[in-house]
Amino acid sequence: MKNIIEELYYGNLHPEGFIVPTDPEYRPLNRKISDLMEEAKRNFSENDFKALEEILDLNGETSSMLTSEAFVQGFRMGALMMVEVFCGEGKGVEKGD
């Protein structure tokens, strides 16, 4: 395996593919969502169900944006921690950034 910098350069890092929530409530919640979607599909008109799907798709897009931003901010915070570890407190880091 190449070093992590080369892997990043070549676009070979895909951490989102390895995320598996460990919260025991995750799978039951997903099951409940699936069950409710099936119930909605049976009970809603075709147009109402399509509207629901569109709302959920848009919600998924905004959730993805938030997750991406959280990753970026977490990465930056981790990098700043490493700067502090190697340089000492307050060295090489502007306060308030």
Image (spheres, helix red, strand yellow):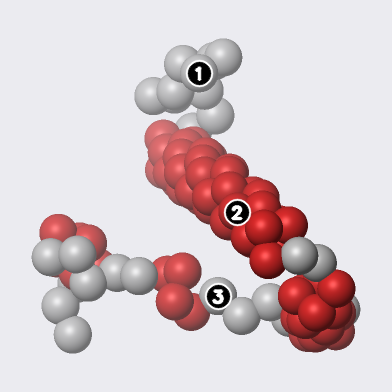
Dot 3 alpha-carbon crowd within 10 angstroms: few under 14, some 14 to 19, many 20 or more: few
First reached walking from the N terminus: tag 2 or tag 3: 3
**Where on the picture, by quarter, is residue 29?**
bottom right
Q: Which mark is residue 75?
A: none
First reached walking from the N terminus: tag 1 or tag 2: 2
Secondary structure under badge 2? helix
Secondary structure under badge 1? loop
First reached walking from the N terminus: tag 3 or tag 1: 3
- The residue mark sitting in front, 3 or 1, is 3
Q: Relative to 6, is 86 above or below? A: above
Determine if residue 57 is in view: yes
Query: In terms of depth relative to the viewer, which is nearer, 27 or 2?
Result: 27
Q: Residue at x 48, y 79 (%)?
A: 18
- The residue mark sitting in front, 2 or 3, is 2
- The residue mark sitting in front, 1 or 2, is 2
Left or right of 24 on screen, residue 86: left
Kind of residue at disc 2 = Glu
Q: Residue at x 61, y 80 (%)?
A: 20
Q: Residue at x 22, y 72 (%)?
A: 12
Kind of residue at disc 3 = Ile
Kind of residue at disc 1 = Asp
Residue 35, horizontal then vertical, whole percent? 83, 83
Residue 74, horizontal then vertical, whole percent? 54, 46
From the image, tell me which residue sits under label 1: 97
From the image, tell me which residue sits under label 2: 54
Q: Residue at x 85, y 73 (%)?
A: 43
Q: Relative to 35, is 65 above or below? A: above
Query: In terms of depth relative to the viewer, which is nearer, 50 or 56?
Result: 50
Q: Relative to 7, is 56 above or below? A: above
Q: Which mark is residue 19?
A: 3
Residue 61, horizontal then vertical, whole percent? 53, 50
Q: Relative to 6, is 23 above or below? A: below
